[in-house]
Image (spheres, rainbow, N blue to C red):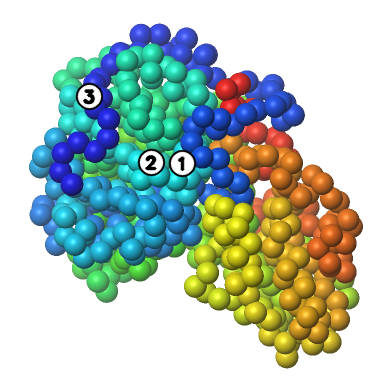
Amino acid sequence: MNGPDGPACVDADVNNTQAAMERLGVEDGAQPGVKINKRLGRGAVQTGLTHECGVFGAISTGEWPTQVDIPQVICLGLVALQHRGQESAGIVTSEGKNARSFNSHKGMGLINNIFNDEAMKKLKGNLGIGHTRYSTSAASEEVNCQPFVVHTAHGALAVAHNGELVNCSSLRKMVLGRGVGLSTHSDSELITQALCLNPPEGETNGPDWPARINHLMRLAPLSYSLVIMLKDKIYAVRDPYGNRPLCLGKILPMGSSYVYKQSSSQHGTVLMNGCAKNGVDDRPEGWVVSSESCGFLSIGARYVREVLPGEIVEMSRHGIRTVDVVERPADKQQAFCIFEYVYFARADSIFEGQMVYSARMQCGRMLARESAVDADIVSSVPESGTAAAHGYARQSGIPFMEVLCKNRYVGRTFIQPSTRLRQLGVAKKFGALSENVRGKRIVLIDDSIVRGNTIGPIIKLLRDAGAAEVHIRIASPPLKYPCYMGINIPTREELIANKLNPLKLAEHVGADSLEYLSVEGLVSAVHYNMKSTPSDGLGGHCTACLTGEYPGGVPDDDW
């Protein structure tokens, strides 16, 4: 679709940035017990353990038009991120010539159903961004599909966002107060419109987009990873706390191997076009940015590195470079969401220099040390419990054996928004391998328990298949607090860990015993193979949903 795609926007001035920042700031001293009415009036409120989106961007290098099928690269990249959201998706592309219009296609449902051959033919471009979404902060409606596109005095601007603004209500009031209209309750539209505000130091010779992004990041410190597209550039942005994941990759010619070079500039690290190990010219055909690295190999891309907390990376036909870094307060550590390791990320993704699978396996090892039990076999609730189960089995010396057969055509039960769909999903999702189960004492590993609705039917399934004992071990600590940074854990009342201790919960779900991994055990497991440590200012993790300790304090009083 050419032409407007979203509300009109004009550039505006923000005259008193300091006052705005004070007004929008999050109080560090606020306590987790404060009553907060989050998302009231901002669209449908869904419940459950859900991540609301994944973002992806790609740009070709060299001469345009490119020989790289950028729209197809983005589509395949989004397919690899489908586990992060299954309600809607969108792609916006630019041919790099016309600043006034982009090519766009968005819709409800799964990516393969939205982007058919006809839709893909319309998405011509040398660069583009994409998004796959599960709704938390706004209703599951097509109007909230991303990427958002606005048309400014300087041309079109597209934004895709993963995360949730902790000070959304205050920022929304400020943007509306500048005379800018908002047509949805989405944080992402709000970010898009806020980027159209002039930075306080003013501009000469047209818009200074890095300065505008910097201004937004100082107004809204948490929580987001963004891909922002202009006519011929993409900006990859990660919040100063590094709460949401974002990484960079390079598209290489088929059959290539590479090393990449780093050099310093006044803006920080610049990633140059690489050279082949065998001396043959091996410059990348393009660059990609993604919430996770799991889809890179399938599109012919190689993982390069993560976008650093607070970093603004500019991607152009000439390569990528760091143009700015927005620092967090000196007394604050990085706060990467630890539940990316536990549940949300795909096992083959890389975070903080380690593969998610290895961190999950180490969680299983720690769980075996903390909560040993006599049993005949160790097994898992597939898929995200499997790595931890292997770790538990290796540490305990009890053999691993599959006991559940998964129907792979049923979606993840926590990603489905309604209670009825979740319950149907549990009933249809698993079958028991009775020959492996009969007469056995089973240690069954799962990654997490939210409401406790799904583990009970699984235990019953195993008992009906002849299990002698079923001991549940959870490879994460009990969930006790809501998340305000992009994970939908809306109320403490719905979390089973706030109602029942492990002994009572085991009785409630029909298990012989039930134990969780400790918070200390989880943090230790995640740090075990990390390439950086908290002493570096990196490697800190957000454990707010487990401990109630929020990296920026509790959000503003309109939540």
Q: Nearer the viewer, residue 104 or 253?
A: 104
Q: Residues within 10 Å of mark 3 (few under 14, many from 20)?
A: some
Q: Nearer the viewer, residue 319 or 183?
A: 183
Q: Are marks 1 and 2 in contact (CB under 8 Å)?
A: yes
- Distance between mark 1 and mark 2 Cα atoms: 7 Å
Q: Secondary structure at mark 2?
A: helix
What's the amino acid at mark 2? Asn
Residue at which label 2 appears: 144
Residue at which label 3 appears: 207
| Location of the C terminus (image quadrant) | top right
Going from N to C along the chain, the mark reached first, 3 or 2, is 2
Residue at which label 1 appears: 139
Q: Residue at x 35, y 30 (%)?
A: 183
What's the amino acid at mark 1? Ala
Mark yes or no: residue 433 visible: yes
Residue 198 percent across, percent down from the top left = 29, 18
Foreground mark, 3 or 1, reads 1
